[in-house]
Image: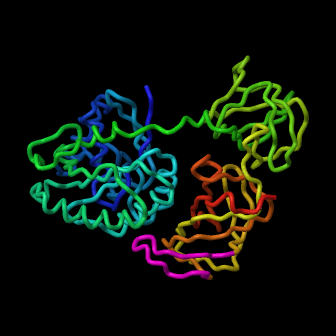
Amino acid sequence: MENLKFVMVGHVDHGKSTLIGRLLYDTDSLPDGRIEEIKEICKALGKELEFAYVMDHLQEERDQGITIDTAQIFFRTKKRQYTIIDAPGHVEFVKNMITGASQAEAAILIVDVEEGVKEQTRRHAYILSLLGLEQVIVVMNKMDLVGYKKEKYEGVKKELLKFLESINIKPKHIIPISAKKGDFIARKTSKLSWFKGPCFLEALDDFKTKESPKEKPLRFPVQDIYSFDKRIIAGRVEGGIISSGDRIKVLPSEEETVVKSIEEYMKEGVKKAEAGKSTGIVTEDKVFVDRGFVITHTKDLPIVTDTVKAHVIWMDKKPFDKNERLLFKCATQEVMCSIDKIEKVIDSSTLEVIGKDADTIRNREVADIVIKTQKPVVVENFNKIQELGRFVLQRKDTCAGGIITNINNINKV
């Protein structure tokens, strides 16, 4: 059965966790005893049944009332299996949300129809646009709080569509729902009889799964090298398939050799490893290889460069100063870098252009930049191989996340 990953984003308290809990309940995907456990928790807290607690299962999250990390959970319809990536809505956890969204094939943007479009709604929508997600459903939640009125739905829909059009997002559907009451989640209800579109699960089943990463060119970022009775190069296959007997190229050194064997712990006779698999290889020749190198086949190669054009979102309260040096981390690569040029800075919630040829980037601002790395790195356009197309910048901690763009216009080394 095929699997589709989708991310759920939106302003804090607009109902993401409640919708996920309701989805799992309506598709009979909850583990045995879980709903009884949630009922007991809610009873102890003096609340009605809260589907949000299905996802917010950590006591810390219950205490704070916010989802603090990116979680994955599964359910299935008659058509396929789904992986929900629940991305945090709270402003301090935007970096986790980027990580979650970058793994998805589709996105659900949730809007509280009573509160309308908020700052985080716009920011999260912008991140979806930044990551190139084209399959988007908007759900207008909490219709029960506005008496299921069509006029309220239409008013918020008009405001949201105006913004989404400005960032080139064209949602497939905009569906009125009540996650708490179950309206238009797994079934249509008479309370929303004026809405003639599909319910949420019907719309979700319309989405298409992406090309399997194993159909893509081989990309094997090296994590480590182990020397036992043989020298094993270990890593995770991010694209394609690597097999014993394959002729491979090591980047950035450009040495070539042949895969002598595929090595897996406590397994013998393994002949290949597909995308998504962590594995080890032994080569026929002793080539120079180190953590951060990328192994490929000899055709359809990634770019080796010391100059990267990118979109970034700044996530540190301390602004970036143009003279700073930062750590660039992409896949297993880590190299010092500078930002040579800040071409444009944008407010991520209003899309207002704050400045061009700027000298600084402030918290929650988005920028188009040119990065110069201390030594060459192996990179891709984000939409081709995500693991080599996304990166983070660090001071002591992560201060920015971004994706590589315009790869055909950067300088090859």
Residue sticking out furthest to the top? 269
Task: Give the side of residue 325 with respect to residue 42, left or right.
Answer: right
In the image as oriented, which residue stretches furthest toward the right? 286
Residue 284 lies, in percent from the top left, at: 88, 29
Residue displayed at 43% across by 25% down:
1
Q: Relative to residue 284, is residue 319 depicted above or below?
A: below
Image: magenta residue range: 341-358
Task: From the viewer's side, name the closer residue of 125 and 99.
Answer: 125
114 sits to left or right of 95: left
Picture coordinates of residue 343, whole percent (x, y) = 61, 75
For residue 306: magenta?
A: no
Q: Quadrant of the C terminus?
A: bottom right
Q: Nearer the viewer, residue 199 or 119?
A: 199
Q: Which residue is rendered at x = 44% and y = 33% of the image?
A: 3
At horizontal 27% and vertical 48% (from top left) the residue drawn is 18
* Residue 348 covered by magenta stretch: yes
Residue 98 at what x, y percent from top left? 50, 56
Q: Is residue 382 above or below residue 234?
A: below
Dividing the picture into quarters, in which one does residue 352 lie? bottom left
Q: Is residue 269 above or below residue 201?
A: above
